[in-house]
Amino acid sequence: MVRVLGILAGILMVFVSLWSFGHGVYAFISSPPQKSVEKRFHEEPRPLALASDGLFGKYDREQLQRGFQVYKEVCSSCHSLKLVAFRNLQDLGYSEAEVKAIATNWQVEVPDVDPKTGDPKGRKALPSDHFPSPFQNEVAARAANNNALPPDLSLITKAREGGPAYVYSLITGYRPVPANLPAENRPGPTLHYNPWFANLNIAMPPPLKSDGQVSYADGTKPTIDQMAKDIAAFLAWTAEPRLENRHADGEVTLLFLLIATILAYMAYQNVWHGGASRAVRRTGVLDPENMAKRDAASAGGLDG
Ligand code: HEC
């Protein structure tokens, strides 16, 4: 009796599953899912080739220095970089003295306390300090940005699909509002249409406004496109300053595996070179008689 009930319950389950599957297929065909407005207008990141790409990629120090300059002169008035210390800039090729000067002259002081009174106070940055936030706190940051919060940029290239290519596309991606954009998706007075941003309307005003906004010491022409590429490359570095070590480790590992493979092949050739492998080839099995013959032959050989 219990068995019959079990079978009936099973049949019922199968029937319900099939019915719900069929219903889903029918609904999908009769009214296919609509793409949201955001999806329809959204653009994929534009391709960006960086020297650090690929298995053997290395950072282009000059580009990183240019990108740092863009960060310092443009982005740092709104965005912090709290996971990066001034002394990390030595990786970009700045000397110790240059790093010290950059820290001391940084436009905002780092928060500290007065050692006598315990009152909060600012002090000049040291190379060991991390890049301070331009704002006292989140409320101040929002107050200065129409209630939007400029995110910390240390890991932004890891946090967004497309990474550096996304940053590059985003900051060069301000476009006139398309005529066919539905009213509810049009940017409000404090927002800016940018089809690379997830919801199409970003609170950040276009940070790069004109060619020559920064002047590069290495003679590179500071077009908007170039500055955008450089800051994207710099933010790829802030998110992964140890990338070159990782690549170097990978190269050593690949070399090791290659050598190990060659050695293993040579060992295989050596071990299976004698009669055993021939015996196997002839008969298809490890024939004890053949093996014995081989052993006798090789023993004889030794004697002779
Ligand atoms: C005037 C202040 C200001 C400046 C200058 C500025 N930003 Fe922003 N940025 C913002 C604000 C505000 C947001 C948050 C936007 C939002 O949530 O709509 C933001 C967001 C971003 C984002 C995140 C977008 C996302 O996907 O969430 C990136 C990346 C970014 N900014 C990069 C930069 C770079 C690079 C520079 C320098 C070239 C720069 N910003 C300069 C205010 C600024």
Image (cartoon, rainbow, N blue to C red):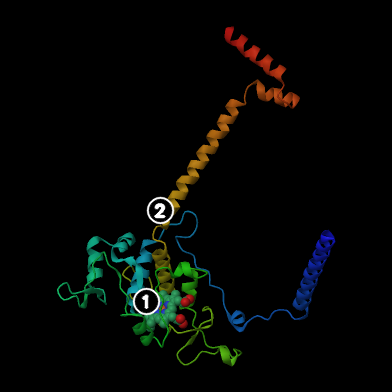
**Mark 2 vs 1, N-terminal side:** 1
| Residue name at image x 61 percent, y 90 percent | 180
| Residue name at image x 47 percent, y 66 percent | 158
Image quadrant in which you'd find residue 108 = bottom left
User: Whole-percent x and y of residue 35?
Assistant: 65, 80
Under circle 2, the secondary element is helix
Within 8 Å: ligand 1 and the Cβ of disc 1?
A: yes
Q: Is residue 37 above or below residue 24?
A: below
**51 and 143: which one is in front?**
143
Report the amino acid beneath label 2: Asn
User: Can you tell which mark lies on residue 79?
Assistant: 1
The single residue placed furthest to the left in the displayed view is 116
Few, some or many residues within 10 Å of mark 2 (<14, 14–19, 20+): few
Asked if residue 77 shows in the view, the reply is: yes
| Residue name at image x 56 percent, y 74 percent | 44
Quadrant of the frame with the N terminus = bottom right
Q: Which residue is mark 2?
A: 245
Left or right of 212, for residue 172: right
**10 and 278: which one is in front?**
10
Under circle 1, the secondary element is loop
User: Whole-percent x and y of residue 187?
Assistant: 51, 89
